[in-house]
Image: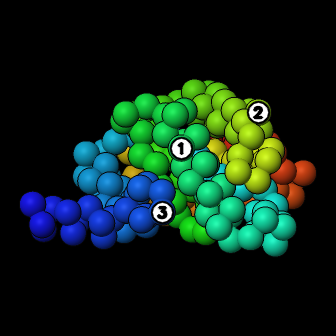
């Protein structure tokens, strides 16, 4: 039991309870072995530095926890939720098409915008990409993750509070 608890703690973010990068890597290796297709949603809290500067780091942490809860509420049991960096998150959607992934991303965006966070109303920007097992040799999971990240940054550049699909997603 202790070993299981330590393994769980090593693979999760202590603040949010979501997977961390180590946990994400474990799942991605497993899914690659199973040849499991999935969609990726990369998301980032808009103007997060302003939240920390205006309200303090405790409120910033509460906003991160709030987003994690929004992700839990808006996801299925089979989805993988990950805090990948400070205010950055990943959602992996197994066996999910581009259209459905885009709808889920948009639902996350609008529900976050509509809810009052510990810092008032906040928004998120999201990027969506896909990884298909049949493209395994030509297109790596790491490339799919980078495409989602590029789409996320394009959403930021285009004004924030939006969903952008990766080219070819």
89, above or below 80, in the image: below
Answer with mark 1 or mark 3, whichever residue precedes in sequence: 3
User: Between residues 73 and 43, which one lies in front from this camera angle?
Assistant: 73
In the image: residue 167, left or right of residue 68: right
Q: For mark 1, does the 10 Å Cα neighbourhood hold few (<14), some (14 to 19), or many (20 or more) residues?
A: some
Measuring 31% from the left and 49% from the top, which residue is drawn there?
Answer: 31
Measuring 79% from the left and 47% from the top, which residue is drawn there?
Answer: 120
In the image: residue 41, left or right of residue 152: left
Kindly indicate whether the residue at mark 3 contacts the one at mark 1 (C-beta within 8 angstroms).
no
Answer with mark 2 or mark 3, whichever residue precedes in sequence: 3
Q: Which of the 4 quarters of the picture holds residue 116?
A: top right
Name, please, the residue furthest toward the left: 1
Q: In this orientation, does residue 40 appear?
A: no
* Residue 19 in the image, given as x and y percentages of width and height: 40, 58
Name, please, the residue furthest toward the right: 159
Secondary structure found at label 1: helix
Secondary structure found at label 3: loop
The disc placed on residue 114 is: 2
Q: Which residue is mark 1?
A: 69
* Residue 126 in the image, given as x and y percentages of width and height: 69, 48
Secondary structure found at label 2: helix
Measuring 25% from the left and 45% from the top, which residue is drawn there?
Answer: 34
Q: CA distance from mark 2 to mark 1?
A: 14 Å
Q: CA distance from mark 2 to mark 3?
A: 23 Å
Measuring 69% from the left and 62% from the top, which residue is drawn there?
Answer: 59
Kindly indicate whether the residue at mark 1 contacts the one at mark 2 (C-beta within 8 angstroms).
no
The disc placed on residue 15 is: 3
Q: Which of the 4 quarters of the picture holds residue 11?
A: bottom left
User: Between residues 76 and 166, which one lies in front from this camera angle?
Assistant: 76
Q: CA distance from mark 1 to mark 3?
A: 11 Å
């Amino acid at each position: 039991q202790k070993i299981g608890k330590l393994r769980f703690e090593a693979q999760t973010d202590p603040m949010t309870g979501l997977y961390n990068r180590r946990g994400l890597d474990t799942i991605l290796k497993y899914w690659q072995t199973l040849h499991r297709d999935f969609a990726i949603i990369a998301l980032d809290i808009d103007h997060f530095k302003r939240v920390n500067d205006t309200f303090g780091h405790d409120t910033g942490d509460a906003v991160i926890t709030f987003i994690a809860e929004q992700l839990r509420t808006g996801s299925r049991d089979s989805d993988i939720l990950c805090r990948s960096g400070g205010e950055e998150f990943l959602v992996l959607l197994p066996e999910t098409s581009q259209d459905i992934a885009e709808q889920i991303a948009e639902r996350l965006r609008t529900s976050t915008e509509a809810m009052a966070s510990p810092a008032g109303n906040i928004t998120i920007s999201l990027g969506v990409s896909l990884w298909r097992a049949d493209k395994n040799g030509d297109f790596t999971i790491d490339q799919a993750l980078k495409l989602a990240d590029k789409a996320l940054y394009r959403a930021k550049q285009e004004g924030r509070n939006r969903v952008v699909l990766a080219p070819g997603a």
